[in-house]
Image (cartoon, rainbow, N blue to C red):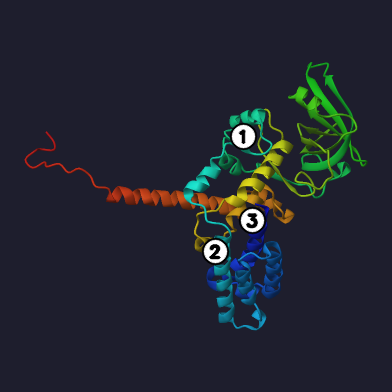
């Protein structure tokens, strides 16, 4: 499984610049530089991965296709790029037998309880959100994304802005406001540059059981100002129990919509497990020629990146749901919807009906 996933990533890395070069009738061919070096490097990785696999001759043919590429004329370059794309398709087909629609559906319809990390309690919580299968989980896309590669200092946070920070809990207590009698759970946070008070007016028992003095936490929410004091109400807050280099920190982090019984960190871990286990076995049935003509990123890359983006420069597009990965998934959904409607229309127009003889019978009295 790991070998399959690694080869797919190498092929995707090859396919991206080649797809750009061939896009719109090779209009961008001259903009794609360094293909000979890139292909040689990636094929070297693939050969090391596969060693004595019977795909090695195909990999070598792919490498040789770009020997002397920079000295070739325009038409020769076009032929090299097109041949390389065809070879990538052939490598995929030989390395993994293409799933039939029935086999793909069987994987997609795997109950959520079989995903690593999902026990009976979490299964019930997922089901309350309508997530019953692997397919439901794959298309339960993040609500938004946070850039946790860099955190804002508390001293730099301003009222009215949305901010993400890393701090330590120096105090926490449940208080009751004298005038209103309202109960509030307050946590005082510091990062060494200032103080911030996090407040919860609901779900107090749950938060109170998780947050303790001395813990390090990542928090995110809208900053408010109250009598010279900075506050954040009902922030997304996660206790840091490991180094800030994981699927939870040091990267763009997906934030999912939750329901009772689900926590961001747990959902994120389960989604990571699910993608690791099931994504390498799935393939799109969208024709690759359509992908290339429309400039779409590969299916597996789209699902992987929409859940765990690798490029922090795209956070704006990701949060607006207009990233190449969102566009790919939306295109596929609309493509098959239109195809289904067209096939249905074709079926209706060709379906034979029962004819009735009405000679001499008035249609209207």
Nearer the observer, 228 or 362: 362
Whether residue 204 sits left or right of residue 188 in the image: it is left
Of all residues shown, which one is farthest toward the front? 52
- Tags 2 and 1 touching, CB below 8 Å: no
Q: Quadrant of residue 208?
A: top right
Q: Secondary structure at mark 2?
A: helix
Where does the C terminus fall, quadrant-wise? top left
Query: On the image, numbered disc 2 is attached to which residue?
Result: 292
Instruction: Decide: is 75 above or below 218.
Output: below
Q: CA distance from mark 3 to mark 1?
A: 24 Å
Q: Residues within 10 Å of mark 1 (few under 14, many from 20)?
A: some
Residue 168 in the image, given as x and y percentages of width and height: 89, 36
Query: On the image, numbered disc 3 is attached to which residue?
Result: 4
Residue 5 in the image, given as x and y percentages of width and height: 65, 55
Residue 354 in the image, given as x and y percentages of width and height: 20, 43
Nearer the observer, 50 or 98: 50
Q: CA distance from mark 2 to mark 1?
A: 36 Å
Instruction: Decide: is 258 above or below 326.
Output: above
Q: Nearer the viewer, mark 2 or mark 1?
A: 1
Q: Residue at x 38, y 52 (%)?
A: 342
Q: From this viewpoint, is residue 27 visible?
A: no
Residue 227 in the image, given as x and y percentages of width and height: 86, 31
Q: Quadrant of residue 254?
A: top right
Q: Residues within 10 Å of mark 3 (few under 14, many from 20)?
A: some
User: Which mark sits nearer the N-terminus, 2 or 3?
Assistant: 3
Q: Secondary structure at mark 3?
A: helix
Nearer the observer, 228 or 324: 324
Q: CA distance from mark 2 to mark 3?
A: 22 Å
Query: On the image, numbered disc 1 is attached to which residue?
Result: 113
Q: Secondary structure at mark 1?
A: helix
Whether residue 188 sits left or right of residue 73 in the image: it is right
């Amino acid at each position: 499984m790991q070998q399959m996933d690694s080869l797919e990533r190498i092929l995707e890395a090859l396919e991206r610049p080649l797809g750009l070069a061939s896009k719109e009738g090779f209009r961008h061919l001259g903009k794609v530089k360094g293909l000979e070096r890139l292909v040689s490097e990636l094929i070297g990785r693939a050969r090391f991965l596969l060693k004595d696999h019977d795909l090695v001759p195909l990999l070598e043919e792919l490498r040789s296709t770009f020997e002397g590429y920079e000295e070739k004329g325009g038409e020769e370059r076009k032929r090299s790029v097109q041949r390389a794309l065809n070879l990538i398709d052939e490598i995929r087909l030989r390395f993994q037998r293409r799933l039939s629609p029935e086999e793909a559906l069987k994987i997609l319809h795997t109950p959520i309880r079989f995903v690593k990390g999902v026990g009976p309690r979490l299964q019930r919580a997922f089901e309350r959100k309508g997530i019953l299968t692997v397919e439901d989980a794959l298309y339960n896309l993040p609500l938004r994304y946070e850039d946790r590669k860099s955190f804002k200092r508390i001293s730099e946070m301003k009222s009215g802005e949305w901010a993400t920070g890393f701090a330590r809990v120096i105090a926490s207590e449940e208080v009751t406001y004298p005038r209103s009698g309202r109960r509030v759970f307050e946590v005082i946070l510091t990062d060494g540059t200032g103080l911030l008070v996090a407040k919860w007016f609901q779900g107090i028992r749950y938060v109170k059981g998780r947050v303790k003095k001395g813990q390090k936490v990542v928090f995110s929410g809208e900053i408010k100002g109250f009598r010279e004091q900075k506050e954040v109400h009902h922030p997304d807050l996660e206790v840091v129990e490991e180094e800030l280099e994981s699927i939870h920190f040091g990267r763009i982090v997906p934030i999912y919509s939750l329901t009772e019984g689900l926590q961001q960190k747990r959902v994120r871990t389960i989604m990571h497990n699910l993608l690791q286990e099931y994504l390498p076995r799935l393939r799109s049935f969208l024709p690759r020629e359509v992908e290339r003509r429309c400039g779409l990123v590969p299916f597996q890359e789209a699902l992987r990146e929409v859940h765990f983006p690798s490029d922090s420069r795209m956070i704006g597009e990701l949060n607006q749901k207009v990233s190449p990965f969102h566009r790919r998934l939306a295109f596929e959904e609309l493509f098959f919807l239109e195809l289904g409607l067209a096939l249905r229309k074709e079926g209706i127009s060709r379906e034979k009906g029962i004819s009735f003889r009405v000679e001499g019978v008035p249609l209207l009295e």
